[in-house]
Structures are given as C-alpha cells and as structure tokens.
Image (cartoon, rainbow, N blue to C red):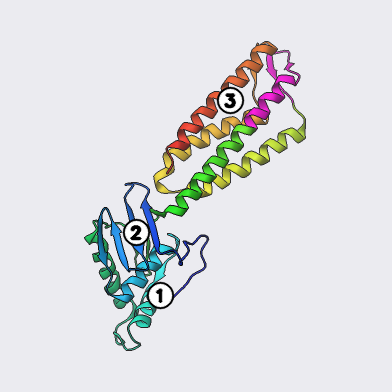
Amino acid sequence: MITKDCGWRVEVEMSQITLKNIQTGKSATLDSNLKILKSAGREVFIQDSAVYILLHQLFTLQATTLLSYNDIATIVRDQKSLIHMEDSPDSIIANKYIFKARSLLKSLMIDDFIMTIRGLGYKGSNKWLPILEKRANEEIKNAFLEEITAIIEECITYSESADITHDKSGFSYIKPDQNTVMMHFKRMNDCYYLFLRRYTSPGNCIELLELKEKIAKILLYAIYWRVGDSLTDEKFRSDYKNELKLTLRQINQITALLA
C-alpha cells in the first residue's frame, strides 16, 4: 500500500472517515472496518480490495496530492497479483480501476469526488474536506476573529489617551511611537495570512476579496494612518472607535459565509 507525506492526514486508525462537500453540504463516509461507502442514507459494500485501497487513498490524502497512473497500478498489482494485467500500461490499469471507484460513488449520487489530471493521474476534489479539517478551519477562523478584535480594542484604548495632532490644513491625526505601529502590523500580518492559507479555495474568492478590503482598512487604522478633517479631539476619537467597530462587524459577517 502506498503512503504519502501530507500536510494533514485523517488518522487511518479511525474506522470511519467522513468528507463533506463545501459547496453542496453533502457528506460521504468510508467505513474502513466494514469496507462500506455511505452517503445520504445509502451504502454500498466495496468487494474489490484494490478499489477499496484506492478509495481509502483518495479519502485520506490531501486534495492537492496526485495519485499517478503508476501509483494506482501499484495499488492494483499489490492487491491482485504481479501478473494482473501485466501487459497493460499503467494508464490503462489506472483508468479501469478509477472507473470502478467512480461507479461506486455514482451509485451514491456522487459524481464530483475524483478529478482527472489529464496525462498524469487522478486526485480527490478540493470541494470535499474531512470533517476534522472543517473543525480545524473553524478554530482558525475563531482565533483570527479574536486576534483582530483584540488589536482593535488595543487601538481604541491607545487612541483614547494619545495626543491628537492638528496641522495647519485642519487635518487631525495620531502619530504613535514606532514600536506600537510595528507590533500591530506584525500581529495583523501573521493572523491574516494564516487565515488566508486555510480558507483559500475557488468557492471563497468573493468573500476573501471583501475580507481583504476590510482588513486593509483596519490595518491603516491600526498603524494610525487615519486622518480626520477639522475634527475636535473628542470627535476624532469617537469616529475612530465607531469606524473600527463597524468594520469588525462587517468582518464577522463575511467570515461567517466562509466554508
């Protein structure tokens, strides 16, 4: 049996591995003890050991991990015999057993799980994520929101005691010390890119672009590149606080839409 080193892995000791489609909400479960594939109240027994191992690989490997024709042919020969289809090229063997795996999935009304990488092999669709991965996503989302909220609260607290500069043109602004600015920038940079790496997917493009705009606004406020026009100190601080609170609410709304 082939194994690959992945960034994350569902533990193979678990008797059931469940994946969920982030677009449709449909789930599929592979029971490794009973060798049963289940979805939407239906189930099918996987009789062919090579097909079972192939599906197990697709369920447990990262969606970005390719199973080459040679990988699949090796799985088949390990489960069958070295002479099984010995005169056939790896691509023919791979295509035949992928067809069998897809037929089982189709009997459960799943036709978008296995993706063809033309000329190379096959991989699982990135629309299907392990339930464990979904939980990890939620934890990172919550940590991201908590960190952004904490930074905003600290910015507001700092603005309440910092001196407001008024220049000759009537503009008002805060000019903080460099250490405060760099600390806020580093924290926002770290938490944002960790969040972005986790949630980057084709289905999240619109929300991630909207989120980028809101984060950019908060970043400018966090490094105090916010200029008021003819504002009193009290009005400047009030507007500064209200704008940050509004943007935080918008960020919460956007992240709630991310799967």
Residue 244: mark: 3
Find numbered disc 3 in the image and state the secondary structure of the residue it sits on: helix
Mark nearest the camera among 2 and 3 is 2
Residue 127 lies within the magenta run: no
Q: Write the start and end of the magenta stretch as one range.
A: 151-175
Find numbered disc 1 in the image and state the secondary structure of the residue it sits on: helix
- C-alpha distance separating marks 3 and 1: 52 Å
Find numbered disc 2 in the image and state the secondary structure of the residue it sits on: strand
Q: Quadrant of the N terminus?
A: bottom left
Q: Identify the residue at horizontal 56%, vertical 34% (top origin).
A: 215
- C-alpha distance separating marks 2 and 3: 43 Å
Which residue ends up furthest to the left in the rendered image?
Answer: 107
Q: Earlier in the sequence, mark 1 or mark 2?
A: 2
In percent of width and height, residue 123 lies at 38, 64
Q: Quadrant of residue 56?
A: bottom left
Residue 156 lies within the magenta run: yes
Inspect this view and state whether residue 155 appears.
Answer: yes
Residue 29: mark: 2
Q: Are marks 1 and 2 in contact (CB under 8 Å)?
A: no
Residue named by callout 1: 71
Q: Quadrant of the C terminus?
A: top left
Query: What type is the residue that disc 3 sits on?
Result: Leu
Q: Are marks 2 and 3 in contact (CB under 8 Å)?
A: no
In percent of width and height, residue 109 lies at 23, 56
Q: Identify the residue at horizontal 51%, vertical 28% (top origin).
A: 249
Query: What type is the residue that disc 1 sits on?
Result: Asp
Q: Earlier in the sequence, mark 2 or mark 3?
A: 2
